[in-house]
Image (tube, rainbow, N blue to C red):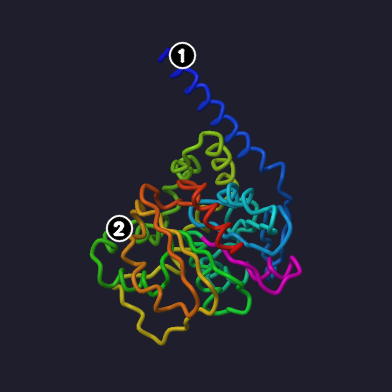
């Protein structure tokens, strides 16, 4: 009897896993693709749903598909738009490190919002998408209704940790390596997709990275990531004027959780921080259900 029950349970799990994989694959058929012009740079996006605009910005190494679970979880109440940042997948890949300045990356998001006929949006960003989202909220607050950040501390927190936390300095060695000339020659599409756990999704990532520009990916680091000697930013703070929701997978080894400390001092509205034990840097995939349900509840409160 025990064997039968165990077999049934395993079969049920296999069926559930297959259904989940099918749902993930199906999003390619559910989204509508489009392009926005950002001062001559074509920015690709995928969209689904209707309602208030939500713009989702991926990080490194990633592309719009990273948000598939969140898109499906929000599309009944929101117009969800996931972009490919410049250099990635189906977006343009201008040559030259200067074309990856964070001000231009912010401009890309603003171009998408304008292209979709809106003046502002709920902004969601992970990793480098989080960098762009923070800078958009700080410098163009009128374009940000609410802000959701995943595994990217506020720039003040990261600046402080890089300047004073030896563990963060050590764990940022990868970024220093990416800043070296010719570092892109060490990258491969398969290697960049190695973090993706689902085999079917990994195939899509390898294809997307095959369409991407490795030098462009690393230009984000060369142009915008702090360089040694690290110094803390102590200039006057522009406090954020919109509600903020943050997620942080506590197993992230690239961006350590102490950088979250003090975030409340840089936000003038309500701040919600959700830490996720057992999840790593790609918390939107490692804890997809938790992130999606929490995001939805926060947006609909």
Q: Earlier in the sequence, mark 2 or mark 1?
A: 1
Tell me what residue is drawn at x 36 percent, y 71 percent: 157
> In x, y percent, where is residue 190?
48, 40
Q: Secondary structure at mark 1?
A: helix
Q: Which x, y percent locates residue 91?
A: 64, 56
Position in image of residue 47 (x %, y %): 70, 54
In percent of width and height, residue 56 lies at 59, 59
User: Circle 2 is placed at which residue position?
Assistant: 171
Please state, as top left, top right, bottom left or bottom right, where the C terminus lies in the image: bottom right
Q: Which residues are magenta?
A: 109-125
Dot 1: few (<14), some (14–19), or many (≥20) neighbours within 10 Å? few
- In the image, 199 versus 275, the foreground residue is 275
What residue do we see at 58% from left, 57% from top?
296
Label 2 element class: helix
The outermost residue toward the bottom is 236
Look at the image and say whether residue 105 sits in the magenta stretch.
no
Q: How many marks?
A: 2
Q: Residue furthest right?
A: 117
Q: Quadrant of the N terminus?
A: top left
Circle 1 is placed at which residue position? 4
Looking at the rendered structure, which numbered label has been put on residue 235?
none
Are there few (<14), some (14-19), or many (20+) residues within 10 Å of tag 2?
some
């Amino acid at each position: 009897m025990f064997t039968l029950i165990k077999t049934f349970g395993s079969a049920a799990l296999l069926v559930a896993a297959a259904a989940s994989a099918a749902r993930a694959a199906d999003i390619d058929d559910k989204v509508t693709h489009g392009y926005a012009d950002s001062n001559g740079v074509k920015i690709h996006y995928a969209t689904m749903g209707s309602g208030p605009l939500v713009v989702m910005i991926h990080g490194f190494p990633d592309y719009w598909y990273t948000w598939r679970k969140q898109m499906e979880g929000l599309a009944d109440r929101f117009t969800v738009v996931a972009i490919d940042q410049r250099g990635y997948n189906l977006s343009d890949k201008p040559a030259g490190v200067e074309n990856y300045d964070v001000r231009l990356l912010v401009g890309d998001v603003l171009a998408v919002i304008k292209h979709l006929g809106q003046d502002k949006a709920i902004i969601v960003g992970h990793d480098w998408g989080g960098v762009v989202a923070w800078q958009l909220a700080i410098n163009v607050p009128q374009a940000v209704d609410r802000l959701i950040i995943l595994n990217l501390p506020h720039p003040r927190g990261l600046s402080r940790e890089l300047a004073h936390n030896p563990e963060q300095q050590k764990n940022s060695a990868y970024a220093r390596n990416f800043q070296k000339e010719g570092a892109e020659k060490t990258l491969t599409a398969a290697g960049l997709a190695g973090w993706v756990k689902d085999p079917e999704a990994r195939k899509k990532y390898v294809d997307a990275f095959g369409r991407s520009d490795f030098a462009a990916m690393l230009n984000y680091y060369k142009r915008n990531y702090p360089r040694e000697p690290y110094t803390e930013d102590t200039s006057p703070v522009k406090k954020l004027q919109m509600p903020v929701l943050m997620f942080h997978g506590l197993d992230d080894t690239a961006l350590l959780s102490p950088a979250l400390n003090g975030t409340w001092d840089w936000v003038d509205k309500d701040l919600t921080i959700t830490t996720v034990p057992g999840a790593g840097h790609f918390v939107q995939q490692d804890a997809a259900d938790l992130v999606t349900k929490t995001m939805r509840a926060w947006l609909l409160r």
